[in-house]
Image (tube, grey):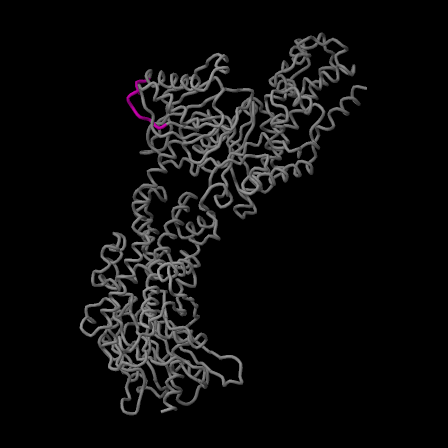
Amino acid sequence: SMTRALSQYLRPFHLSKEKLLDISRRLLLEMEKGLRKETHNDSTLQMQPTFVRTRPDGTENGVFLGLHLIGTDFHLLWTKLNATLYWHCVTLCEESSTRQVIILVHFCLQYFDYIAECLGNFLEKYEMESKIIPLGFTLPFPFRQTRLDEGILISWVKDFKVNGVEGKDVVQLLQDAIQRRGDYEIGPVAVLNDTVGAMMSCGYEDPNCEIGLILGTGTNACYMEEMQNIELVEGDEGRMCVNMEWAAFGSDGSLNDIRTEFDLELDRLSLSPGSHPFEKMVSDLYLGELVRLILVKLLNENVLFNQKATPNLMTRWNFESKFVYELESERTGIDKIRSILKEFVQDPSEEDCLAVQQICHIVSLRSISLYAASLTAILAKMKKNRRLSRFKVTVGVDGIFYKRHLRFQIALNTAIKLLSPDVEVTFLLSDDGGSKGAALLTAAATRLAAQRLEINKILYRFKLSQEQLIDMKQRMRKEMEMGLKAETHDMSSIAMLPSFVRSLPDGSEQGNFMALNLDNFNVRILLMHIPSNDEEEIEVVTTAYSIPQEMFHATGVELFDHVVDCIDDFLQKNNIKGSLPVGFTFCFPCKQTKLDETPNSPKQRGFLIKWTKGFKTTGCEGKNVVALLQEAILSRTIEVRIVALINDTVGTMIACAYENPKCEIGVIIGTGTNACYMEEMRNIEIVPGNEGRMCINMEWGAFGDNGCLEDMNTSIDKQLDSYSQNPGQQTYEKMISGMYLGEIIRSILIALTEKGILFHGKVSERLNTEDMLTLDVLSKIESDNLGLLQVRSILQNLGLESTCDDSIIVKEVCKTIINRAGHLCGVGIAAITEKIRENRGLEDLTITAGVTGNVYSLSARFAKVVDDTVKMMAPKCAVSLQFSDDGSGKGAAFIAAVVSREQVLT
């Protein structure tokens, strides 16, 4: 009869693995609802952002106070952190103060005056009243935050209440109370929940600690959530600790299917009926009462105790949870059970004792299982966030339930392994998490604030205001005008070189044409077949030949001999016979006097002004590069006819213009940078003639070489320039092009590391390696699609041992530098489009800019910033940015086709 009755009443307490996983899924749904702004108020979980974005990293120094409010108890702790030789935490002194519960009927002023009094006495006792020490304030009640030093109390819980505090900022109330005393001051205050304190204190010992649990009189959890998922807070980089307040889980009825008649009775008898159903099923405050209600039911059913219960068993809340822990243990013998039960039952039988032990075990086991199911939801969320199949995490735990109950600890570990087999979980007991965690959070926050000041000092110069961008546009316009005028041409830092390209493709071109492209890494040769009108697509065959490193410092004869070797190989491999017209793209600044070959003037004129992009080949600067190439060709038995010399930027514009007649601007933003556009002939004073237009090769990479951008250059820019291969040259290019972006970023990372902010303050040999940060790497790091773990993995693959906090900072640096590059490039395009609009006397202008280069193609952020900046800086111009794949190569072939078309016409 007893066995059947026990089975009947205890069966609802048994939860299968499937049911526990289902509960875990329910909690996960509530978590998602609580994180979203639209559904936040519908969730039973508060999912409060704590504004805790960092944990101790071992570099903290100084003295900090921790104040843990535990109802009528106050625990104060004075902690010193020393990271000079090795990181250690010393508790210099600590005290606890208790006041009678009569305080509960008083108002908030008296309550916070008492806290201020305790704090003042503590500081005076240890002769600290003259010092201003940062304070961490742990409040174990639900509160709302909009910043770290604010805590708006939502409600009192755990049968504790002080009038006049709910809805107010507890930090301000404490500071007001301290001001009323007037005999001491405290430094910055950080307020935190006790759950966050547990995570912070354990994070001091184990950097993998990213979850906090309170398993005691009440229960709660917190964890590090991705910022991009917390819609209540602006920002999407890094992580923030979220205080779940999971005690209220199920208050919408979602746990009714597992609540027993005893859970419902306990809730009815509690001081807060209808609230915190989850907490009432699992926490230390309620387990004893749950067991008592079951025992009373079995007593009334004549199943237990033979009607020999004492009044103590019939008194609510008399059966404490500590009895549950002792009674359920397998090590507790019959005599010990009788000794505990004699206060509640007269002369219990052995059968009674074993039944009570079984009841305590089942109630305790259900609590453990529900804790495990709930923790599984957090683990699943973190695993999903980080896109991992397996991961390792440490959980900081505080609360008497966990501390006093060894069997509970073992059972919780076992349950987690069953429900989350793909997560390696380590439980770490929090040592005074409330006070120590508060002090450590304040230390970490103080470190973070100091680091933020240092980061801002470096990065603020790279963040350009709208006024600075407008000023930059005006400066570029001035240099452009100077470059076009004969009198001031040589004084301008922008060369504004006539390209002698006056015609764009009109669609009538057809036939086979070759393009030869000499850039900073390759000799690229392209064969293009432009079909007649009744055919479909342009056919292109292209081959890239690498330029050996020794050619960068060879003679001009050796370089152009290598180019002709590549041409010969291409002709043979593609079985090309006869003399095809060739457009020669030369990706370096040249002064041209004509574009094409004519009977009266058989040689194109293109004089190299200077090498850029690392080239130091001798015997070329000031020389006609077409003549140098022709001489190399004539020394061989190959037949090619160079009909046009163009810049790669001009080629980009031409290639896009074939597809889009509105394309009158070309921009390259890759290893180097340049731009060109169609200028009115009447404005080009260095070329005779006033009719029509001509493409101007700006060579805008040198913008600022005359000192006009001196105030825009940061100390990092100047440092990079000093150790570059061409100091004092290509100022604008060094601020925006792919060849230099990685080095700017690397220099900033070194500066931050030397200040102890990154990579544990150690500048590694790898970080000192030039050009380690390629454009491909930078574009991945700054991408919004890449999480912090992936960024950290990239950095570690580069040989940079980093933390997730390091990853946040590195990502910020990359974004800042790429944003600046995008803004500056956008300003340049805006200056060009505004000039074209004004040239033509138009109120509005619709135009296309052909853009190529790996900075633009690899970085979606850069492309968007360029587009947004053009819109902002040239509001009267509708500018479409059209990406051109291999525009310089195709453009040279199109120019060859245009020249051939015009020669036929003449």
Outermost residue, right side: 1
Q: Position of residue 69 (x, y in %)?
A: 46, 22
Residue 537 in the image: state x and y as whole percent.
51, 79
Relative to 628, residue 397 above or below: above
Would residue 132 be counted in the magenta stretch? Answer: yes
Tell whether position 639 is magenta.
no
In the rendered image, residue 577, in percent from the top left (x then y), is placed at 43, 89
Q: Is residue 659 visible?
A: yes
- Residue 109 occupies which quadrant of the picture? top left
Q: Is residue 320 above or below residue 864?
A: above
User: Which stretch did the figure color magenta?
Assistant: 126-134
**Which quadrant holds the N terminus?**
top right
Residue 409 on image: x %, y %: 58, 28
- In terms of depth relative to the viewer, which is nearer, 481 or 229? 481
| Position of 219 relative to 562 (above/below) | above
Q: Is residue 259 left or right of residue 41?
A: right
